[in-house]
Image (spheres, rainbow, N blue to C red):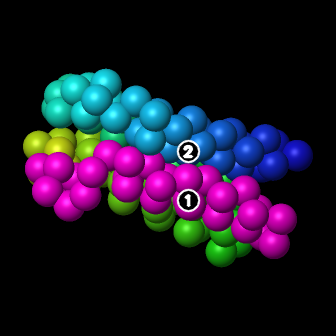
Amino acid sequence: MLASIYTDSIAAFLLLSALDHILFQRQVKYWLTKPAVVRFIGACLLLLALPCLWWRGWYFWALFLALAVSGTWRCFLPQHSIRAQERSYPRWVHGCLMLAAAIAVWALRARA
């Protein structure tokens, strides 16, 4: 049951982040050009990845890997993360990617 609450929370977090990126692009761009904010988000992602180590199975290992890689990149290389995302695509595209990730986290949890 705790695993279900955890995965639902991750999916909700991704959904809210996606909506922020899509609906509030200017504000998100302002905040996510600050290395301290990006570093903080990276640290939060690393903390969110830790509970995945408690449970077993491909689902939690994949979720751990995705959160840990994303968190490590943002926490330890915030300037690189900022430049890469500014050059790659607009914020709303990143929002759409996070929306797809939220749907995947939610949909695949039933199969895990």
Total label count?
2
Q: Which residue is mark 2?
A: 14
Tell me if residue 37 can be seen.
no
Which three-letter amino acid code belongs to the residue tagged 2?
Leu
* Chief SS of the magenta region: helix
| Magenta-drawn stretch contains 28 | no
Q: Which mark is residue 101?
A: 1
Which three-letter amino acid code belongs to the residue tagged 1?
Ala
Residue 61: percent from left, percent from top:
58, 67
| Magenta-drawn stretch contains 102 | yes
Tell me if residue 75 can be seen.
yes
User: Is residue 64 placed above or below 50 in the rendered structure?
Assistant: below
Residue sitting at 71 percent across and 49 percent down?
7
Residue 43: percent from left, percent from top:
36, 36
Q: Quadrant of the C terminus?
A: bottom right
Side of 93 relative to 37 (left or right): right
Q: Nearer the viewer, residue 31 or 10?
A: 31
User: Is residue 82 placed above or below 36 in the rendered structure?
Assistant: below
Q: In the rendered structure, are the residues bearing label 1 and label 2 in contact, judged by CB atoms less than 8 Å apart?
A: yes
User: Callout 2: helix, strand or loop?
Assistant: helix
Residue 80: percent from left, percent from top:
12, 51
Cα distance, mark 1 to mark 2?
7 Å
**Magenta segment range?**
83-112
Callout 1: 10 Å neighbours few (<14), some, many (20+)? some
Q: Which mark is residue 55?
A: none
Q: Nearer the viewer, residue 3 or 34?
A: 34
Residue sitting at 27 percent across and 45 percent down?
74
Between disc 1 and disc 2, whose residue precedes? 2
Residue 8 falls in which quadrant of the image? top right
